[in-house]
Amino acid sequence: MEKHRVLIMRCEEYDPDRICAVVKTGMEELGVRPSGKILLKPNVVIAHPEIFPHAFTRKEFLDGVIAATKAMSEDVEELAVGERSGITISTRFNFKNAGYPAVIKRHGVKVYYFDETPQVAVPLKGKARLRNQVFVPKPVADCDFLINLPKFKAHPWCRLTLSLKNYIGIQDDRHRLVDHNSFLEHKIADLQEVVDSKFIAIDAIVAGQKMMLTPTPFPLGAIVMGTNSCAVDTVGCHMVHVDPTELIHLRLAAERGYGPMDLEQIEVSGDFPLEEVREKTKDFQFCLERIDEYFGKDSNLSCTVGAFPESHSPDYCWGGCPGALQEAMHIFRGFYPDVDRSMKKIRYVVGKVEGPLDLEEGERVIFAGSCTSWEGEIDGEHVKIEGSYRTSSEVDETRTRSNDMLLKHTIALWHCLKNRSSRYIHVKGCPVSVAENVDYLSAFGKIKNPNFEPRLVISANIAYWQMQFGRLWNRVGNM
Ligand code: SF4
């Protein structure tokens, strides 16, 4: 059987000309000739030059790849860049902060903000699929040649985000959080059936460690390229000493036949030998710790973790509320480094918990998530938190609720206001998102809410209304 090829190339600097030359070489070696409707999908989950500088595929990378694609493509019908950012902030806002508009304008390529485009249902037929259909933006369903441009990052829910995981960013807010719980890895595998990545180039020039929104930089000096997501992710795992079988979405995708996860089936070449990369990444850091172990004694946030409903993951929910809490706390730490000590005491309770909580004086409780249940006494009052979790097959992907940014914040802040004098609150949702965690932690912990930070509030809201207008415009245009 012919081996899949993956190239690891040296690239120390964010120099668009150098990146273009490297990617062009990669395309030539791999026999890649983009054509038809070409869609470039970077990872811009969030972007800000000061607050989130290492979370996204850099503009110089996009610049170099567009130039290489133009040089190598033939019979081009359309060349476009498309993405849906995370935590409900409009993609326009993040593209602007990432410096994308100037690159897009200079190259004269089209842009698709997936939060503004129509969404279409794509039926799935794979044997081990989680769902029978998934919703994706029309430009994704229509494209002939997807070029996947992930950022090389560690991930607190999945260990690593590379080529396969970058597909979470094709879904809009309504559908993105469906199965974003202990089924997250299955969801990622489902999304692979929608469209193949015909070429993958990972921005590993400066990789991200630990978190996905607020990673710490790791100068890796590499661009990783290939034509099969599983093969590329397998090599990515080995680059940072991860056993590919521990990257669950990779294992599921490989089991469904999307590609290999065994290095024996992959030919690794390029000018940056894998062993040399591994030598460099001996101290690459991850964050795959449970929240009840993560926040130490110095933090005023402590967590009680119970049991979870799904038999494939009864001890922990890696794709849901716990990871969202970690990301939310790291956002706070980015704005207010002393937040762990300056916040009021909070106990975060998630899962089915039994027995007393042994709360400290003044400690307030956030019961997070629809699966969470507990019964006991708080301040002499009998409290019963009831779970209302629904498994994947009970959640209808055609009847999802809006995850609109303003609506979400308004509901969360109103909920907090109504419970301002209560010792506890139950936040429902599966998952409780990062954005919601920020709002509830802010209100209950008496921490300033970063959503109202002057550096963000005006530009994020302008971009939000531009997004709403763009969505309306596209809807009218498609009537
Ligand atoms: S409510 Fe949260 S913790 Fe519970 S299953 Fe859903 S995502 Fe996981």
Image (tube, rainbow, N blue to C red):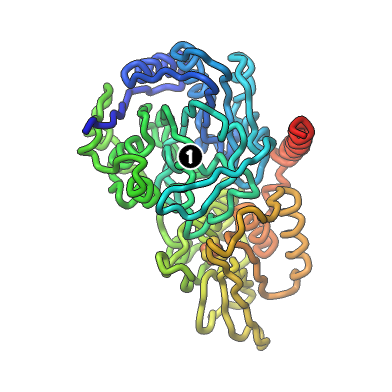
462 sits to left or right of 355: right
Q: Quadrant of the C terminus?
A: top right
Q: Position of residue 244 (x, y in %)?
A: 30, 46
441 sits to left or right of 411: left
Say which residue appears at 64% left-offset and 75% top-offset.
362
Say which residue appears at 44% left-offset and 32% top-offset.
197
Q: Position of residue 25 (x, y in %)?
A: 35, 16
Where is residue 469, by image quadrant? top right
Instruction: Tell me: residue 9, above or below residue 446.
Output: above
Instruction: Tell me: residue 374, above or below residue 117.
Output: below
Q: Is disc 1's CB within 8 Å of ligand 1? A: no
Q: Position of residue 388 (x, y in %)?
A: 61, 72
For the question of whether residue 141 can be seen, the reply is yes
Classify mark 1: helix, strand or loop. Answer: helix
Instruction: Tell me: residue 195, above or below residue 410.
Output: above
For the question of whether residue 300 can be seen, the reply is no
Amino acid, disc 1: Asn
Q: Which residue is mark 1?
A: 166
Where is residue 363, by image quadrant? bottom right
Ligand 1 sits in which quadrant? bottom right
The one of 20 and 248 positioned closer to us in this rendering: 248
Q: Position of residue 458 (x, y in %)?
A: 76, 38
Say which residue appears at 66% left-offset and 61% top-offset.
440
Say which residue appears at 63% left-offset and 22% top-offset.
110
